[in-house]
């Protein structure tokens, strides 16, 4: 005989059970919990943005993807559900994944645009690997990446490419096709990965959204659009990147905390927060680069065994604002308080240079470092921050960092320069060299040209060139050679490419010579 439920017996059960049974008794029926419906199946094709890797160390490398069924969905969601998605990853010695070396699982979450950053550890030094991701039965494209040599190894050679300034509306990324043919070990992207304006161009590659970027959703859409390009996806899938930004990832010529009297400080901080978050979501960065509001640490250091140390810099976030009354060749540019790196990054860089035992010491950064007579009164470059530049030049002159090489972009043109301790004195010691690479597309199509020793009054200025392309640098213990590659056109999906000039610097002999 069934026992009758009374108020006293229900209360003896206590808590949630009592509440459920009380409801049952009141209705004279049985209370059943409603089953939770299963999550909606993912839309097919969530790996539209491909895969990427970055910041290789001797025992680890970052692998990246972002799940996005519709990468240009204007709400910034990527066409993804709000729920988290489990993503598995694999790293193998072979492209068929028959020799797995690492595997794991992580979660892609809405809060980070369903992006995935995995810092894969426990790898062998100086070795190529293959990797891929899987999400609810869908498989990503296969990526290829590599580790750096062991810290005590002196690699016989190292090859890297310099890229910058890839305005989507200005042309096709034909330079990346040529870059892949050069088989670099790593690509250093020196900024202007996206452009924040709403330009449409005339090649059917108009920006989305069709307006200047203003919100987190806007930045996510624009970065998703750029990552959708097949040539950019191909180079990301084939080789690791070391990435830093310039200005257009946020807005043109921005500086530090901004001093625009027409814009409230909190409005600029909100714009930085949105931009930095989307930027992190779309780059193969470590957790150390995850932003905190309007702040992100991008300066960091990589090493290629004993052959090279690479200092990746941020010349935007900590700089003193550049104002219209500061001329690059005027006394204001020498004011001690003006800085392009900020105090903390400057100490970090100088300590790293002074303590380096590498054969070559590379500064991968955004804007031209050398004194550029073609720039004139432009104060956005190191010319506008001469005390900051002199601090670095004096560190180079000390001889403690051997064979300094500065890499730069920004100006959509090729340059080669000797770095002088005193640029105003042609007889001043040469303490390093600089390779400035032209744009991938920005500025649109221009005819290739080269002028050697273009300014007799400034003999440190060794070469000026035009064209669209990249720089391929080959480094050995004995020398570093820069090949300036240009494509015939960015107005078509494919293009012939050629080396227009090459420069060499020998170990222990600062100064450039034509190859």
Image (tube, rainbow, N blue to C red):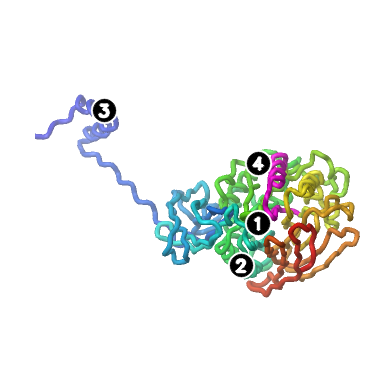
Q: Residue at x 68, y 64 (%)?
A: 474
Q: Nearer the viewer, mark 1 or mark 2?
A: 1
Q: CA distance from mark 2 to mark 3?
A: 70 Å
Q: In the image, is residue 433 above or below residue 400?
A: below
Q: Residue at x 88, y 44 (%)?
A: 331
Task: Say whether disc 2 or disc 3 marks the residue closer to the N-terminus.
Answer: 3
Circles 3 and 4, Cβ within 8 Å, touching? The answer is no
Residue at point 74%, 48% (across, down): 400
Tag 4, which secondary structure? helix
Looking at the image, which residue is at 82% across and 55% down? 430
**Circle nearer the N terminus (3, 4):** 3
Instruction: Bin the neighbour count of mark 1 within 10 Å (Cα to Cα): few under 14, some 14-19, many 20 and up.
Output: many
Q: Are marks 1 and 2 in contact (CB under 8 Å)?
A: no
Q: Position of residue 93 (x, y in %)?
A: 47, 62
- Mark 4 crowd level (few <14, some 14–19, many ≥20, 10 Å Cα): some
> According to the image, label 4 marks what residue?
269
Mark 3 vs 1: CB contact within 8 A? no
Marked residue nearer the N-terminal end (1 or 2): 2
Q: CA distance from mark 1 to mark 2?
A: 19 Å
Specify whether residue 345 is painted magenta: yes
**Label 3, label 1: how far apart the Cα atoms are:** 71 Å
> Residue under circle 3?
14
Where the C terminus falls, by quadrant?
bottom right
Q: Residue furthest right?
A: 457
Q: Position of residue 191 (x, y in %)?
A: 68, 55
- Identify which residue, 242 or 153, lies in the foreground: 153
**Magenta segment, which residues?**
342-367
Q: Which residue is mark 1?
A: 307
Mark 2 highlights which residue?
Answer: 183
Is 19 included in the stretch rendered in magenta? Answer: no
- For residue 306, which quarter of the picture? bottom right
Position in image of residue 259 (x %, y %): 75, 41
């Amino acid at each position: 005989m069934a026992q009758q439920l009374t108020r006293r017996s229900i209360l003896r059960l206590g808590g949630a059970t009592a509440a459920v049974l009380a409801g049952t008794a009141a209705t004279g029926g049985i209370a059943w919990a409603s089953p939770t419906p299963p999550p909606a199946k993912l839309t097919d094709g969530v790996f539209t943005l491909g895969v990427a890797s970055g910041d290789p160390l001797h025992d680890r490398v970052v692998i990246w993807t972002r799940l996005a069924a519709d990468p240009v969905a204007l709400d910034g969601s990527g066409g993804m559900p709000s729920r988290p998605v489990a993503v598995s990853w694999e790293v193998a010695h072979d492209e068929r994944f028959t020799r797995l070396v690492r595997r794991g699982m992580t979660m892609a979450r809405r809060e980070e645009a369903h992006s995935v950053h995995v810092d894969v550890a426990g790898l062998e030094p100086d070795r190529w690997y293959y990797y891929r991701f899987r999400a609810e039965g869908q498989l990503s494209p296969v990526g290829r990446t590599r580790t750096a040599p062991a810290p005590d190894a002196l690699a016989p050679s190292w090859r890297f490419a310099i890229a910058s300034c890839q305005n989507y509306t200005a042309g096709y990324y034909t330079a990346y096709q040529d870059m892949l043919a050069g088989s670099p070990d790593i690509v250093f992207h020196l900024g202007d990965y996206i452009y924040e304006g709403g330009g449409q161009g005339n090649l059917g590659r108009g920006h989305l959204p069709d307006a200047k970027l203003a919100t987190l959703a806007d930045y996510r859409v624009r970065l998703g659009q750029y990552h959708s390009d097949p040539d950019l996806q191909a180079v990301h899938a084939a080789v690791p990147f070391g990435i830093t930004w310039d200005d257009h990832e946020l807005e043109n010529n921005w500086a530090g905390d901004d001093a625009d009297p027409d814009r409230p400080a909190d409005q600029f901080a909100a714009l930085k927060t949105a931009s930095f978050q989307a930027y992190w979501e779309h780059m193969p960065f470590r957790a150390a680069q995850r932003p905190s509001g309007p702040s992100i640490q991008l300066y960091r250091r990589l090493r290629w065994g004993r052959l090279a140390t690479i200092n990746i810099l941020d010349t935007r976030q900590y700089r003193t604002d550049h104002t219209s009354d500061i001329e690059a060749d005027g006394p204001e540019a020498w004011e001690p308080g003006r800085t392009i790196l900020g105090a903390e990054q400057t100490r970090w860089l100088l300590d790293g240079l002074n303590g380096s035992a590498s054969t070559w010491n590379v500064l991968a950064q955004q804007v031209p470092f050398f004194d550029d007579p073609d720039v004139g009164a432009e104060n956005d470059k190191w010319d506008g921050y001469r005390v900051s530049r002199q601090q670095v030049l004096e560190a180079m002159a000390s001889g403690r960092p051997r064979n300094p090489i500065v890499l730069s972009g920004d100006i959509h043109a090729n340059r080669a320069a000797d770095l002088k301790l005193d640029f105003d004195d042609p007889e001043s010691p040469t303490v390093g060299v600089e390779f400035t690479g032209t744009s991938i597309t920005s500025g649109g199509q221009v005819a290739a040209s080269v002028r050697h020793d273009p300014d007799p009054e400034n003999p440190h200025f060794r070469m000026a060139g035009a064209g669209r392309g990249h720089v391929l640098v080959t480094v050995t213990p004995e020398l570093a050679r820069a090949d300036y590659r240009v494509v015939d056109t960015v107005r078509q999906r494919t293009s012939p490419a050629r080396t227009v000039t090459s420069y060499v610097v020998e170990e222990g002999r600062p100064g450039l010579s034509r190859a």
